[in-house]
Amino acid sequence: MNEQAPLLELTGVRAAYGPIQVLHGVDLRVHPGSVVALLGPNGGGKSTTMKVCAGLLPLTGGELRLAGRRVNGITAQDAARLGICSIPEGRGVFPNLTVRENLWAATGTGARLADLEEAAYTRFPILGERRHQLAGSLSGGQQQMLALSRALGTDPVILLLDELSMGLAPMIVTRMYETVAQLVAEGLSVLVAEQFARAVLPIADTAALMLHGRVVASGRPGDIEDQLSSSYLGG
Amino acid sequence: MPLLETRDVTVRFGGNTAVDGVSIGVEAGCVTGLIGPNGAGKTTLFNTVTGLQRPAAGRVLLDGADVTRLAPAGRARLGLARTFQRLELFLSLSVRDNVRVAGDILRATGRTVDVEKETDRVLARTGLEDIAHLEVSAIPTGRARVVEVARALMTAPRVLLLDEPASGQTERETEAFAALLTGLAAEGLAICLVEHDLPLVMRLCTTIHVLDYGRLIASGTPKEIRESPEVVAAYIGTEEIGTEEVRREEVA
Amino acid sequence: MTSFLTFTILGLVLGAVYAIAASGLVLTYTTSGIFNFAHGAQAMLGTFLYWQLTYGWGWPMWLSLVVVVGLAGPAMGALLHMLIMRGLRETADVTKIVVTVAIMLGMVYLSQWIWHPEEARVTEMFFGANAKIELGGVVVRVHELVCLVVAVAVAIGLRLLFTRTRAGVVMRGAVDDPDLLRLNGHDPDRIAMLSWAMGSTLAVLAGILVTPIGGGALEANQLTLLVIDAFAAAMFGRLRSIPRTFTGAMVLGMTATYVMAYFPTDWTWAGNLRVSLPMIILFVVLIVLPQDRLRVAAVRTRERYRPPTPRSAAVWGAALVAAVFLLALLLDDGSITTFALGMTFAIVALSLTLLTGYAGELNLAPLSFGAVATITGFHFGVTGSGLASRLTLWGVLLAVLVTAVVGGLVALPALRLRGLYLALATMAFGVFLSNMVLRDTTEHTLFGVTFSIFPNGTLIVPPLQVGPFDLRDPRTLLMTATVLFALIGVGLAALRASGYGRRLAAMKDSPAAAAMLGQNLVKLKFGVFMLSAAIAGLGGLLMASAGGSVSGDNFAIMSSLALVMLTVVGGIGYISGALFGGLVSGVGFTIMVGTFNDLATAHPSMESIYKTIGQLLVVATALIGMGVGKNPSGTVHDIVEGYRTLRGARALLAGAAAVEAVLYGLALTGVIGNWWFAILTACLVMALPVAGRMRAAAPVRRTPPELAGVAEPYSDELRERLDRELGLPARERMAKEASVHAVA
């Protein structure tokens, strides 16, 4: 299906928090223009995998490749400047900065504030209305919109989304993924880690199931979906 | 009557409600599970029960006594013990001393304990004798989790709260650990287990409480929990669940 | 009314300077989590540099200002961050504090080296002291107006920076979430560097502005402490809020001025009160701060100590007493008294081994507790008069007891808070004691009793006499101090090995876990602080009596800080670390500088070189202190680890002992001088671990597979090695884990 070289590739990646090893050899590929959904119960290593891809956590083994280049040990700021836009778990916003200041901080990758503001306020008019309000005082959904706005205006190569749905009402989650789907339609590649499989499977090209720090299955979303409840809740 | 009880406990961080009116009970002599997706409020509830976090509303009862305003040390003296998700071992002490110090504290609070004898007993009970002399920084995570349990057991607790005790354990270690918990419960200890390894939770627990968005969405036996559409929705998604899947789980 | 207005303006001016200094402190603390004790020293260095350029070399004032405030200030901050502060992330609070204290001391030593402290230097007010303007009937000096204007400009400037520039917005973001900042493509290190550069500039600015107000004379210690007054203002803003810091600074400045203006002039202590007011206020603010929440996931610190068993501590204690006895045979009476003085400092340092090494809390003013004991002993523990006067045993016991109680009272308000606040409280107490109590030299009459706490600025503390046991004899004094040190040391080792010691270690390693086992943390901290204060009191009283007389300067906060730093450098978890810290800070400095000064006098042609070496050594000790960030376990730990390789080498050890015995024999019979003996012994001590390492380097011991994961940590490398040795395929994790179990 994908003839091109993968945009982001993890081979046998291991990572640990201090003495606690969390990833035991993760293999994962994201091809250009595709959406990969990383599924599985919490504690499986999804968030850790996302942190490794974003450069926040160093690898203790294996290989991380970006567009074919080995980038083990890359710092998060360099990864961001290379076009990896990562929206971390639990609100990727600065609560004590205003909406506009959050967008301003997002220009660290070289984007222009005016462009970012325009993209964000066009897509999410509510953010425009509240541009001078502290991000911490926004509702959960609005905060997530603000976080997602970073992906809109900075023209990233790949978007990493970690638990976009956490703590959000189902309706908002659906709207969030609609936005992601539009970005994908414009050609963006996405790696998304998500507990709520149903929310993300419709837009995913590939799904990978993570358990105990390994990818135990990957393939068409439909196939993976069938395995989900048993792996979540035990047999 | 449950030995440990929360009544309408609510915890807020700024404007966010992390735990929203949760009432659960933990009975003596069995293992009670507390599960839910990431960010559901499990650890916050644990912290509230142990006194590391003040609730905005609601009460925590230990054996019928209101302990909501009591400091962690005071609750510990009433028989509440816990382990930590991120290991909180005493890194400058050996495995044995990590366990022994709990007895030292007990004795300092006026309890008469034979610390040495009790330490030996607990180390034997938890199967840590072979590594008792080692520095805790030198042992694998899976065993370090057991050291935390052993340390908690030294305080002769009535209620034991375990925060993800199986994470970092190998399958063999988890097996031994499950047997230990079953045994402890059989001796009359009330155990509350937060754990991501749901098959383990399903196997050990007689009652399971499920949190989602800080709310209690289900309580029941493992079978009831597995069949609860709300729980499946909380874990996997919000759409309607095909009956086919539920049936498949039953078979499995 | 006019005078009230005048005083109000003076108060505002003082507040303005405090505000400038304090906002710099808050800036660096919020962005890097490091409370910069060297902030005052930076101000001091900047002010000296300004004096050098303007008055020393006669540059135009505007040019010096541009160079000092515009270039040197930011450069100093940026360099500090790059060289030192960046490496302090994820170290214990104690390490952070000690490193910045070391920087502060290093800067003070450096300035005293460059600018000889006995020469007088004065900076004048901007536009001269006589340039005045009348505003609504109140006469204000132009310099004072400049201070106000600069403070307002700093306030507006910071406000604009934080809201109108990207750099400022990003700085605020760094406080919220540094990781998210990195995901946005920013480098938190660069942001922290910027904030250190700005903080340093603000410190320098404050120093230049405040010096002429305080009379204009430049004195390194005083200037350093003057800006430390700003700590209280920063505490008003809870080290976070700049507007509240400004408010606090103004309250501080005005209170200080009103105390000076309106307290009756016959209250001789009003002046002292004014000086110590910021420290009193700092104390009050600490009391009203809300309690910290117990945090889970304590810092995983890198400090590691192997506590000795009581038995080995006893052996080493006996060895120490024997060694000191033999050494004393080589020395004359004067040197023995100096040595004894050093030993009393080492006893004070033991109080830190207990408090910091075992319990993880910090006392920045151990000598001030020594002062409390000395004052008590002087007033209530002396019998006889003139040459026949003696300190009684009961006097010593009373002094120690009073010190313990005072220690408890000082620590009480800060015990609910994090370690940094206890450190600040002790420092506030130390400065307060130096300013208020130790300067209380005049007589008061209270309830019909006429007394003064520190008569004539000097206390004559006679030696202790118990029965026939007279400490007037230097040898008896030295041996008593040594035996006391050894006894307390062995006692501490026994304490550490007891249930109490384990509880202290538990509290230090994880307060949350200790609390969850039923430990009342406040009670435990309170008890250990009192015990530690008692030890410091005993050492301080002995120190006073060893010297015969003491002045307030003997207990100055700078000496306390040097003692703390050197004890940490030696190894805060070790009794020998206390011996090192006590000896070096108590008498080592004096000996070093003295020796090289003697050499310089003896060899006039080499004078400047010898003097430079002496000064360099002093500055070098502070450099070692800054290295604590890299090596938090201390020097003694390294030496002990070095000697560990020698455990099996009996022949080597016996040979070394024989060589040492011969050296001693030669020294005793006068064949070689004491200096040669010292130098050769030092060479021997240093050479042994090297020899041991060479010996150990030959065969590399490998853990046999059956002990894998038991005798050594269970790492990835180990798993891979096991896989190789078992001939397993590398990537099949499940199979591998099972087989590891089969083996382990």
Image (cartoon, coloured by chain):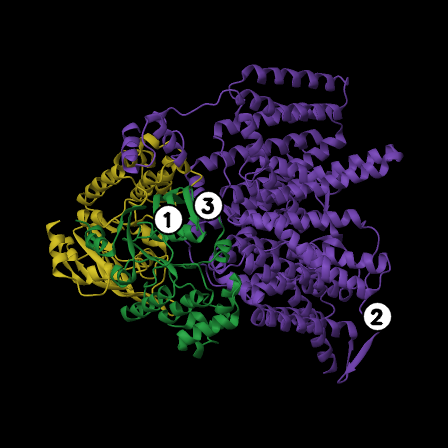
Chain colours: A green, B yellow, C purple
- Could one spot residue C626 in this view of the protein? yes
Q: Is residue A71 left or right of residue C231?
A: left
For disc 2, the marked residue is C128
Percent across and percent down for residue A161 are 37, 59
Q: Which mark is residue C722?
A: none
Which of label 3 and label 1 is nearer to you?
3
For disc 1, the marked residue is B86
Asked if labels 2 and 1 share a chain, the reply is no
Percent across and percent down for residue B105 are 37, 44
Q: Which amino acid type corresponds to the residue marked 3 in the rendered image?
A: Asn
Q: Chain of mark 2?
A: C
Crowd rating for badge 2 (residues with CA inside 10 Å; few <14, some 14–19, many 20+): few
Q: Chain of mark 1?
A: B
* Residue under the image location 29 percent in, 68 percent down: A174
Q: Residue C415, relative to residue B117: is it above or below?
A: below
For disc 3, the marked residue is A72
Which of label 3 and label 2 is nearer to you?
3
Label 1 SS: loop
* Residue under the image location 51 percent in, 19 percent down: C648
Label 2 SS: loop
Quarter of the image for residue A192 reads: bottom left
Q: Which amino acid type corresponds to the residue marked 1 in the rendered image?
A: Arg
Q: CA distance from mark 3 to mark 2?
A: 62 Å
Crowd rating for badge 3 (residues with CA inside 10 Å; few <14, some 14–19, many 20+): some
